[in-house]
Image: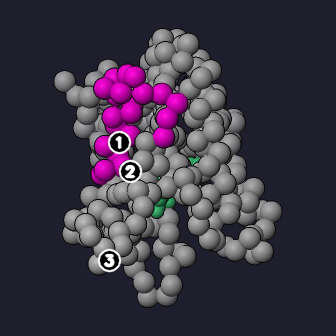
Amino acid sequence: MGRLEGKVAIVTGAGRGTGEKTARLFAREGGQVALADVREDAVRSLASELGAATMPLALDVGSEEAWQRGVAEVVERFGGVDVLVNNAALLHMSAIAETGVADFERLMRVNQLGPFLGIRSVLEPMKARGRGSIVNVASIDAMRGQTGIVAYASTKWAVRGITRVAALELGRFGIRVNTVCPEAGSPQMVQPYMPEGVDAATVLPHMQPNLRTQRKRTIDDLLQDVANMILFLASDESASCTGCDYLVEGGNLAGRIVKGAPGA
Ligand SMILES: NC(=O)c1ccc[n+]([C@@H]2O[C@H](COP(=O)([O-])OP(=O)(O)OC[C@H]3O[C@@H](n4cnc5c(N)ncnc54)[C@H](O)[C@@H]3O)[C@@H](O)[C@H]2O)c1
């Protein structure tokens, strides 16, 4: 039996990166998967590769109307919804002084309003099933600060708040809600902010220095780690887990290794 056998999942931002990895894993584990993204071509070609247990879903997570239409399509095709992965997000990097209202609002709409609308839209189908698991993908940037990401970090911190409120409100319907906070993600998201000539795909695997063996691991390996955590939270294996943040960040928040000190 696959770990998602008999379950219907919606994965947002499934067109590439973490969402694509998660969707592929869900399909391998026997789930029926709606591949949601604003980039319709990407999810259409992924669905044709993965087969009839998947469906492409053109969906802007910041649109209430799109969620209503999208969830109705999934229920009609697969008969219900058991899992929602709120993964789609945008990054914007600039100093506070240079961050415009439009940039801030654009990120809020996708990264913060998006998961809220998603949760609200799957509520009735999940209640009808008497169960559900919602996984909100935040970031290590939802656990600490970093320069240059005021809009992104604040939306990601907000996701952890949404998770807690939703877990408390929806537990009575058998619906669990958790957050995954990865350090690694798709290089494509950060590439526009890399210094000229620097390839994000080669830099990102080196950003977990406390787990020193990870220096040999590829970005693909790191995305698989994130997808594995999302799968665990989506599946019944995590039946006791709700209202929490699950970090996949290579020990970055554990502290620092002091070179030359005992134990280093
Ligand atoms: N890239 C990183 O370094 C990193 C690190 C930690 C956490 N994350 C988080 O991981 C998650 C996945 O990001 P990724 O790294 O795969 O980035 P990505 O940019 O490769 O993928 C994001 C996907 O979301 C889609 N998307 C964007 N706006 C959308 C909208 N309005 N509606 C529907 N889909 C939309 C994009 O088309 C894209 O396919 C995000 O929540 C991100 O914040 C990323």
Which of the image's four quarters has the N terminus?
A: top left
- From the top left corner, tell me how far across and down residue 9 is, in percent: 42, 31
Q: Main secondary structure of the magenta part?
A: helix
Which residue extends farthest front?
262
Please tell me whether residue 194 is drawn above or below residue 107 in the rendered image.
below
Q: Residue at x 34, y 37 (%)?
A: 231
Bin the neighbour count of mark 1 within 10 Å (Cα to Cα): few under 14, some 14-19, many 20 and up: some
Q: Nearer the viewer, mark 3 or mark 2?
A: 3
Q: Residue at x 26, y 70 (%)?
A: 262
Q: Which residue is mark 1?
A: 229
Residue 247 to residue 214: above or below: above
What are the residue bounds of the magenta stretch?
A: 224-245
Give the amino acid type for the residue marked by disc 1 in the picture. Met
Pick whichever of labels 1 and 2 is earlier in the sequence. 1
Q: Earlier in the sequence, mark 3 or mark 1?
A: 1
Circle 3 residue: 259
Q: Residue at x 44, y 88 (%)?
A: 197
Question: On the image, numbered disc 2 is attached to which residue?
Answer: 248
Relative placement, left or right, of 176 versus 108 is left
Q: Quadrant of residue 241?
A: top left
